[in-house]
Image (cartoon, grey):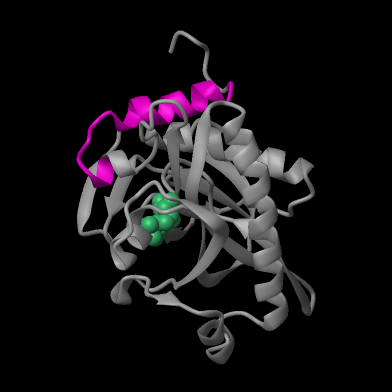
Amino acid sequence: MSRRRQIYEGKAKILYEGPEPGTLIQYFKDDATAFNAQKKGIISGKGVLNNRISEHVFQLLGTMGIPTHFIRRLNMREQLIRQVEIVPIEVVVRNVVAGSLAKRLGIEEGMPLPRTIIEYYYKNDELGDPMVTEEHVAAFGWASQDELHDMQDLAIRINDFLSGLFAGVGIKLVDFKLEFGRLWEGDYSRIILADEISPDGCRLWDMSTGEKLDKDRFRRDMGGEVEAYQEVARRLGLLPDGV
Ligand code: C5P
């Protein structure tokens, strides 16, 4: 690992140069951060679980015709991915009021939304990822109109599929964050799903008990983070029953 060239280190992942041009290796760390990295910690074993969960979800999305950066999992903590130019926008999809939406509008967490809401956040650590509108995205050229349209379309399709996938194992998909990238082919690029989909970037509530099975356990000092992530993996059929 140490001999490979590191391309980028984020809060929860490291990207290394891949074996072939146009590929990267995505390494999942155990580091956890919240509130724009003001809160930091280690969730031992998280990287292994997120690598496995994200592999599973990206593979399923691929079979549904969603283009993604995922190529294959390499080992417990690494996956081979396509190199993309990350669009500097976090796309958040919400089905139920929670988190920053509940806080900002003073609405109690747990209210189902009458329709799915898509929000955009400008990826900028110094500014704390401020929420922006489509107008800002277009005006500042963070994505073209076509790219924005593709991201919206993909986000809705991903939400439909994932809501069903999780509902099938007794989990409510409350909200989640997506990142997209430009895959360049000569002078032409197209939008594909990048980053990861795991309990780090989703709110997942047990449908019968309401128990939180996601990173809110860390954000809110609830404890039991690894057990919650394991429960998600187990329900998705990724861990033997006894683990
Ligand atoms: O905090 P907020 O309610 O805006 O988060 C909405 C969803 O997006 C949550 O599932 C959260 O885990 C995810 N998110 C993320 N990374 C961020 C901000 C939000 O994964 N930087």
Q: Residue at x 45, y 39 (%)?
A: 204
Q: Position of residue 197 (x, y in %)?
A: 53, 46
**Residue 65 vs residue 119, the one in the foreground:** 119
| Residue 64 highlighted magenta (yes or no) | no
Magenta region: which residues?
A: 218-237
Q: Position of residue 127 (x, y in %)?
A: 31, 77
| Residue 219 highlighted magenta (yes or no) | yes
**Residue 90 vs residue 42, the one in the foreground:** 90
**Residue 98 vs residue 180, the one in the foreground:** 98
Is residue 20 shown to the viewer in this render? no
Is residue 222 shown to the viewer in this render? yes
Q: Position of residue 209 (x, y in %)?
A: 38, 26
**Residue 105 vs residue 241, the one in the foreground:** 105
Q: Is residue 212 left or right of residue 61?
A: left
Q: Residue at x 20, y 59 (%)?
A: 38
Q: Main secondary structure of the magenta part?
A: helix
Up-down: is 164 above or below 111? Answer: above
| Quadrant hosting residue 164 | top right
- Quadrant into which the C terminus falls: top left
Q: Residue furthest bottom?
A: 139
| Quadrant hosting residue 53 | top right
Q: Residue at x 32, y 53 (%)?
A: 108
Up-down: is 59 above or below 211? Answer: below
Q: Position of residue 138 (x, y in %)?
A: 59, 86
Q: Is residue 86 left or right of residue 199?
A: right
Quick check: which quadrant has ligand 1?
Answer: bottom left
Q: How many marks?
A: 0
